[in-house]
Image: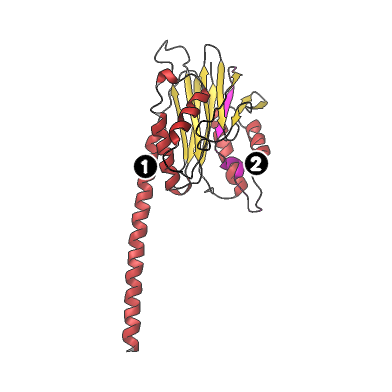
Amino acid sequence: SLIANLTYSCLVRLRKQAELAQAQRWIDQEVREISRIQNLLLPSEINVRGIEVAFKFLPYKGSSGDYFELTSLGGEGDPGQPQIFAGIIADVSGHGPSATVEAAMLDAILRTFRPEERVGAERVIEYINQHFFTRKDRGKFVTMCSFQYNPATRLLKYCVAGHPMPYMLRGDQLIQLNQAQGIPVGVIRDHHWYSSKFEIQKGDILFIYTDVVLEARNPANQEFGQVRLEQTLRSSAEGAHAMVDDVEMAIKQFSQREMLEDDLTLCAIEFTH
């Protein structure tokens, strides 16, 4: 009887282990599929005349709540002239598959924003906010930074909704773009944001990022923080691609880990005209 009970217990345990392994394989497959779909939402190639773009997207555990889009608004025009463009970087609260679904919904909302409505960086955020609300409380909010550039006026218009402040590197001068701060999207349905302007010079590099850059911690539980980020940006080698690589390396060396504890998105935009 004892041997029979032990045998039965072993068989039950083996069956449960097999079921758990099968369930884990299914979960892993679904996460990989979510990650694949999310990658389809990201710009695969950015061809906007007048700028050089470096972009890095590192999701946490396969799928991410980060979102990024950059597109030309200037049509074809003169092939030798820079184009008007607009972009947005966003970060859904939380991470993993649920945040990825929210990021996909954000992409769907953004793609209904008609060209004639592109009248300001703040209008993009207000449009997303109005359509982000549903009949029930979503339990999520989104931080984001929207920006638009017109080479005819050389003005960059930007609006920040609860997102980390962007930076502009001009030679050895680092400028924080902190004049258009507002609350995150998804907090108040009828909230109004405002934008600010910054005059661009040839060679300027705009740097935008998600909050893990500031919040990454080392084994002593210290945050990477704003001071270390600014030191890294100032000491970065020339060019947008070098800047993105330098920031990623600095964060990983500081945290002493290859995989961070949140989604990481970095983008540097160099104005070449």
Q: Position of residue 8 (x, y in %)?
A: 32, 80
First reached walking from the N terminus: tag 2 or tag 1: 1
Residue 177 magenta: no
Q: Nearer the viewer, residue 180 or 260?
A: 180
On residue 225, the disc is 2
Type of amino acid at the residue the image marks with label 2: Gly
Q: Position of residue 105 (x, y in %)?
A: 40, 37
Whether 249 is drawn above or below 4: the answer is above
Q: Position of residue 41 (x, y in %)?
A: 39, 35
Name the residue at 56% across, 50% down: 257
State which region is magenta.
Answer: 200-221
Left or right: residue 66 versus residue 201 is left
Residue 213 magenta: yes
Identify residue for label 1: 36
Name the residue furthest bottom: 1
Left or right: residue 92 versus residue 216 is left
Whether 171 is drawn above or below 251: the answer is above
Whether 173 is drawn above or below 25: the answer is above
Q: Secondary structure at mark 2?
A: helix
- Label 1 crowd (10 A; few <14 / some 14-19 / many >=20): few
Type of amino acid at the residue the image marks with label 1: Arg
Q: Quadrant of the N terminus?
A: bottom left
Name the residue at 53% across, 35% down: 188
